Image (spheres, rainbow, N blue to C red):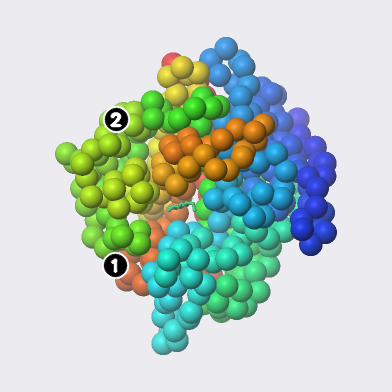
Amino acid sequence: MNAVINKESFGCLTDGTQVNLYTLTNKQGMCAKITNFGGIIVALHVPDKNGKLDDVVLGFDSVTPYETDSPYFGALIGRFGNRIADACFELDGKTYALEQNDNSNCLHGGHKGFDKVVWDANVREMDGAQALVLNYLSPDGEGGFPGNLDITVVYWLTDDNELITSYRATTDQATPVNLTQHSYFNLAGSGDVLAHELHINAEQYLPVNETLIPFGLKESVQYSAFDFRTAKAIGRDIERDNDQLQVVGGGYDHNFIIDKKASKSFELAATVVEPQSGRVLEVFTTEPGVQLYSGNFLDGTLEGKGGQRYTKHGAFCLEPQHFPDSPNQNQFPSTILRPDDAYQSRMSFRFSIQK
Ligand code: BGC
């Protein structure tokens, strides 16, 4: 038997709803702890080159701060990951107003995105392993979005230390959909991530304006701080005198356009190596883009797991997704899901040891 899943209580939300914590453990001892509140990956214990397990994601010890203080630590993101400019878009001749929760923009679905709802959770047998199956029905009008959206997210852990996430959604009215996973990684388990070596399979990225909305033009990464085509330390160019690094709070918070062989194929987007521990993370996805966020807004005020203070660049996120503001930018691949179609996406975090 591959990964097994153990269920325990993760306490109660402020409205009294009880939520659970599911622990997926594989033969190598790697484990993922996931709650059905927001589908949040609370902990991910991964072996280093000596077999020592460390928790490589940021988060909290209890559910309460996830409700009130979390910058989306480990959460499932929707209905629309990333930003929609001025929290507004037009679809089939009608204008929809969303919630402005990031300056005038709508970020990660609005005030109560999929990261703050309770998902139905079931454990199922899949490909010889136990999988955690999460379901959520997002009602028509939630956060201003049209259509009842029925979403299923499946998490499963293989014996090869790969945590796979698959997404499926259907709707009864046309609606934008852009789902992702918002884990904050630190492959050393603590400290900052500036010495982590990052490779991104992208020749182009999307420069943004002062509210982090892409201008719409793809820019070559060549000769810039955004060139991760050959692996380099995240911190190597992060202090460079570059408007794009400054405009997002000092660091990276940009979407990279993955160089893909075919548009919806499952391919490697990025690889991160932490030289001391030897841990390697590879991110695979069917999505066209990946947001690199270098934890620019972490400022030490949050008290995380075990009393840790998470400071600037204390983690990185690699969030596979469609391009930000797609509902307003026709040149980007469409994010509109229609009733006769199904949204499908798959991503994985594959861990190994540096050779
Ligand atoms: C965004 C950042 C934001 C972070 C946490 C990322 O996906 O790109 O701008 O600060 O999420 O909200």
Residue wearing tag 1 = 331
Q: Amino acid at mark 1?
A: Gln
Helix, strand or loop at mark 1: loop
Eyeballing the image, is 191 above or below 229? above
Res 69 visible = yes
- Residue 259: give x, y in percent of width and height: 31, 45
As rendered, which of 289 and 69 lies closer to the eye? Answer: 69
Eyeballing the image, is 86 above or below 323? below
Which residue is painted at 66% across and 41% down in the image? 60
Which residue is painted at 29% across and 48% down in the image? 246
- In the rendered image, the residue lying farthest to the bottom is 93
Q: Name the image quarter holding residue 55.
A: top right
If the image is split into quadrants, where does the C terminus sit?
top left
As rendered, which of 263 and 102 lies closer to the eye? Answer: 102
From the viewer's perspective, is 313 left or right of 18? left
Mark 2 closeness class: few <14, some 14–19, many ≥20 residues within 10 Å? few
Helix, strand or loop at mark 2: loop
- In the rendered image, the residue lying farthest to the top is 50
- Residue 294: give x, y in percent of width and height: 41, 41
